[in-house]
Image (tube, grey):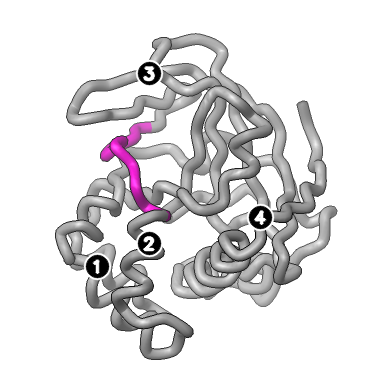
Amino acid sequence: MSGAAVMAQTAGQSEEAHSHDHDHDHAHSHDHAHGSDADRTAAKGYFEDDEVAMRPLSDWEGDWQSVYPYLMAGDLNPVMEHKAETGDKTAEEYRAYYETGYQTDVDRITIEGDTVTFYRDGTPAQGRYADDGYEILTYDKGNRGVRFIFAKTEGDAEAPAFIQFSDHIIAPQKADHYHLYWGDDRAALLEELTNWPTYYPSSLSKDEIVAEMTAH
């Protein structure tokens, strides 16, 4: 499957929150938002269809850690306080929002070649994945996002049938963090807008992650 199908979402208030706080505000604070004007605009969710290009799985290659444990331990409180300085929520409201967004029991992911390994409490589930196209999602606020999709070709039963990457980048480029959606129903995953487990390189300390998230 290839190309883009524009998906007009109608998820109401939860989508409004996602498209503003996650795809817009969240994207603005990362390194790729400091690239070209086109990169910054795309990171905020504004781009033309012909600017989107399928990306190889190698864009996400590496060893990645979930940020959810850091949030739950209070390590990301400075990030929430930083957001509250200019945002429309209190630090505690942002924390609750990201608690829903970051929630996952997969604390580590490794990606090498076409192999993706998910770790739950140190137990691996591994699958091999192939390009399954991308989808462009359109949100209520008018901004958009791209899900780059890979389908499992073989592997452990516990490894999901589909994985969908979202990282505010719309064409081939190495990711510095990403949000991942996974499951066995490709179409149903595209409806998920409130839970987006988020991963940063495992080499980063909690303080370095905080610095990444608050950088402008």
Residue placed at 42% from the left, 11% from the top? 157
Q: Secondary structure at mark 3?
A: strand
Label 2 environment density (alpha carbons within 10 Å; few <14, some 14–19, many ≥20)? many
Disc nearest the viewer among 2 and 3 = 2
Q: Nearer the viewer, mark 1 or mark 4?
A: 4
Q: Which residue is mark 4?
A: 11
Closer to viewer: mark 2 or mark 4: 4
Look at discs 4 and 3 and give the one toward the viewer.
4
First along the sequence among labels 3 and 1: 1
- Specify the farthest residue to the left: 73
Residue 18 occupies which quadrant of the picture?
bottom right
| Nearest to N terminus: mark 1 or mark 4 | 4
Which numbered disc covers residue 98?
2
- Report the residue marked by disc 3: 126
Magenta highlight range: 101-110
Q: Earlier in the sequence, mark 1 or mark 2?
A: 1
Residue at image location 29% in from the left, 37% down from the top: 105
Tag 2, which secondary structure? helix
Is tag 4's residue or tag 3's residue first in the polypeptide sequence?
4
Which mark sits nearer the N-terminus, 2 or 3? Answer: 2
* Marks 4 & 3, CB-CB < 8 Å contact: no
* Kind of residue indicated by mark 1: Leu
